[in-house]
């Protein structure tokens, strides 16, 4: 499979695709896959642009919106991770990954997918120690502080990636692993970037968790960006003792000598990781590299599939999600005592559960617009306009995935934990035509005072089981709760009878599950049912 790797995209998608086309014509080859290592800037519109952490004068809508609106179509399957310049509100809609435009797939906070058998893992964001131990507490509209912390790497994603066993072909990160420059031509790097010297000396150049992941996951290739220069390195790995060689440590301190308590797939011996960092997309800069890697044969389009191990890890570590701002700790060895499970490398039984849940591992092509696209004819003078930040938006792709796997959407949890209303999850295109219909339905519901029971929700929130109401309809899979993890809001005001928390009912059209039905109202008292349980 011919893969093009891009450093920082910085919103220049059209230029990148044109470059790829040029390479294809010049070399008489077909590029099957494009990997982008962050600073992707998937801004659909001017509101998205306000969520990007960059000085105002640099805010530029660039070209992603054309691929989002359908004006242009991405000519090659594109997979990307997030960096530190992103439409954070849009990426937060897809915490476990999803299509941001047709043929353009975001890997999520962290993710693992397979493209024709090639296993690709990645992690979004950059590392800042002061945010690493926090939960995913951010949501739009962002404050000065949360518009930055939202893209800071969290321990949970690192922990999850460390559970992988088996061979990972490609790992994608935005920043570099610390110490990586020791395995390449450091002198040449310092000649081009002399200002890296101080950070190298103090160990501050790059990301510590990425160095841990490099040692733990041992991928065949590692691609990165962020430091805006091309740099290659070969990282040798020490052989691991066979008794505990199949996975890395489960704790976040990089210690990898944990005794394993369950069988798993042995890791294929990757003795060296080939590291390549690329520049940002600018003329005469090393921003694109084409590699030819062995894969399953490609007939027509490449096949994008979920990775069963990753799905299992997402499921078995769902209780470890936190949406609190304060620091919390993940399970590990504490003073030699094992108090709870800390190794989540899937067992054969756990993998079988994934295959039961997913009859096909093919990632559905279920992109839908969830917000209006930028209109260059009406909005071209936007640099002189005041534009508000967006409000939170839920994405049907995430909803469908969470419901199928039985896990929680951290954005929903963060909103609920902060006493916010859950927004509608309708696709943008359907919004207007459904508006009238849903208003009628809301009226009907208010009249009949019917209660929407939690079991009818498409949202698979990991909230406590209701203490009252229709227990027969209780969804047992969603009933497991770690009270330490979810911070529920205080009892909302009683004076409003109905809180407009839109909870999506079953799809009206079962044949097209991605198009969700009209939102229902979730009664305030249903929220208090949850709260009561939490106090028990
Ligand atoms: P961005 O495009 O993400 O805003 O910024 C990337 C730029 O910041 C690059 O030019 C890179 O050289 C610089 N940079 C990023 N991280 C570091 C770091 O840890 N140390 C130094 N000296 N420069 C950095
Ligand atoms: Mn960057």
Image (cartoon, rainbow, N blue to C red):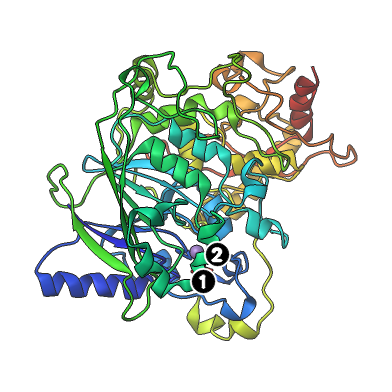
Decide: marks 2, 1 in contact (CB < 8 A)? yes
Q: Which quadrant of the view contains residue 486?
A: top right
The kind of secondary structure element at disc 2 is helix
Residue 530 locus on image (x, y percent): 74, 26
Q: Which residue is mark 1?
A: 195
Q: Is residue 445 left or right of residue 398?
A: right
Q: Residue at x 66, y 27 (%)?
A: 463
Q: Which residue is mark 2?
A: 198
**The disc label shown at residue 41, or none:** none
Q: Quadrant of the C terminus?
A: top right
Specify the farthest residue to the right.
495
Can the viewer see residue 71? Answer: no
The kind of secondary structure element at disc 1 is helix
Distance between the Cα atoms at labels 2 and 1?
Answer: 7 Å
Q: Which sits in the foreground, 214 or 37?
A: 214
Label 1 beta carbon less than 8 Å to ligand 1: yes
Q: Residue at x 64, y 40 (%)?
A: 133
Q: Is residue 21 above or below residue 149?
A: below
Label 2 beta carbon less than 8 Å to ligand 1: yes
Residue 283 locus on image (x, y percent): 33, 81
Q: Which quadrant of the view contains residue 349?
A: top left
Q: Which sits in the foreground, 304 or 160?
A: 160
Q: Is residue 472 above or below residue 412?
A: above
Q: Residue at x 66, y 30 (%)?
A: 452
Can the viewer see residue 20? Answer: yes
Q: Is residue 105 left or right of residue 114?
A: right
Q: Is residue 491 above or below residue 203?
A: above
Specify the farthest residue to the left.
28
């Amino acid at each position: 499979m011919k893969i093009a790797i891009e450093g920082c995209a910085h919103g220049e998608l059209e230029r990148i695709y044109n470059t790829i086309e040029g390479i294809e014509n010049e070399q008489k080859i077909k590029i099957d896959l494009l990997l982008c290592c962050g600073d992707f800037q998937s801004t659909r519109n001017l509101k998205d642009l306000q969520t990007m952490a960059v000085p105002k004068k640099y805010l530029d809508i660039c070209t992603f919106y054309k691929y989002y609106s359908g004006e242009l179509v991405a000519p090659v399957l594109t997979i990307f991770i997030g960096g530190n310049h992103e439409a954070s509100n849009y990426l937060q809609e897809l915490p476990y990954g999803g299509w941001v435009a047709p043929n353009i797939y975001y890997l999520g906070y962290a993710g693992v997918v397979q493209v024709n058998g090639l296993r690709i893992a990645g992690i979004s964001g950059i590392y800042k120690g002061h945010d690493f131990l926090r939960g995913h507490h951010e949501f739009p509209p962002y404050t000065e502080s949360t518009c930055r912390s939202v893209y800071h790497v969290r321990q949970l994603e690192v922990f999850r990636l460390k559970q992988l066993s088996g061979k990972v072909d490609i790992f994608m990160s935005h920043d570099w692993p610390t110490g990586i420059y020791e395995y390449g031509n450091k002198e040449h790097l310092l000649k081009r970037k002399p200002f890296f010297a101080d950070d190298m000396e103090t160990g501050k150049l790059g990301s510590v968790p990425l160095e841990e992941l490099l040692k733990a996951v041992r991928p065949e290739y590692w691609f990165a960006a962020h430091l805006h220069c091309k740099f290659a390195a070969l990282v040798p790995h020490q052989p691991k003792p066979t008794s505990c060689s199949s996975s890395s440590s489960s704790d976040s301190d990089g210690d990898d000598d944990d005794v394993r308590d369950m069988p798993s797939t042995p890791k294929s011996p990757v003795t060296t990781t080939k590291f390549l960092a690329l520049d940002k997309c600018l003329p005469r800069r090393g921003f694109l590299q084409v590699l030819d890697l062995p894969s399953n044969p490609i007939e027509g389009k490449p096949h994008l599939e979920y990775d069963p191990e990753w799905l299992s890890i997402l499921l078995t570590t769902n209780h470890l999600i936190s949406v609190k701002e304060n620091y919390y700790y993940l399970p590990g060895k504490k003073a030699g005592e094992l108090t709870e499970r800390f190794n989540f490398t899937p067992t054969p039984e756990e993998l079988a559960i994934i295959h039961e849940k997913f009859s096909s591992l093919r990632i559905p092509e279920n992109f839908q617009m969830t917000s209006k696209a930028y209109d260059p004819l009406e909005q071209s003078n936007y640099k002189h306009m005041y534009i508000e930040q967006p409000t939170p938006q839920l994405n049907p792709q995430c909803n469908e995935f969470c419901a199928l796997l039985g896990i929680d959407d951290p954005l929903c949890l963060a909103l609920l934990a902060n006493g916010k209303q859950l927004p509608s999850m309708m696709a943008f295109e359907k919004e207007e035509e459904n508006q009238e219909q849903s208003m009628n339905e809301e009226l009907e519901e208010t009249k009949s005072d019917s209660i929407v029971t939690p079991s009818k929700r498409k949202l698979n929130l990991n909230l406590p089981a209701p203490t009252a109401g229709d227990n027969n309809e209780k969804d047992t899979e969603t009933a497991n709760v770690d009270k330490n993890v979810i911070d529920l809001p205080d009892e909302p005001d009683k004076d409003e009878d109905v809180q407009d928390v839109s909870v999506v009912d079953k799809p009206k059209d079962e044949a097209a599950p991605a198009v969700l039905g009209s939102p229902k109202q979730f009664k305030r008292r249903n929220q208090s049912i949850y709260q009561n349980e939490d106090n028990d």
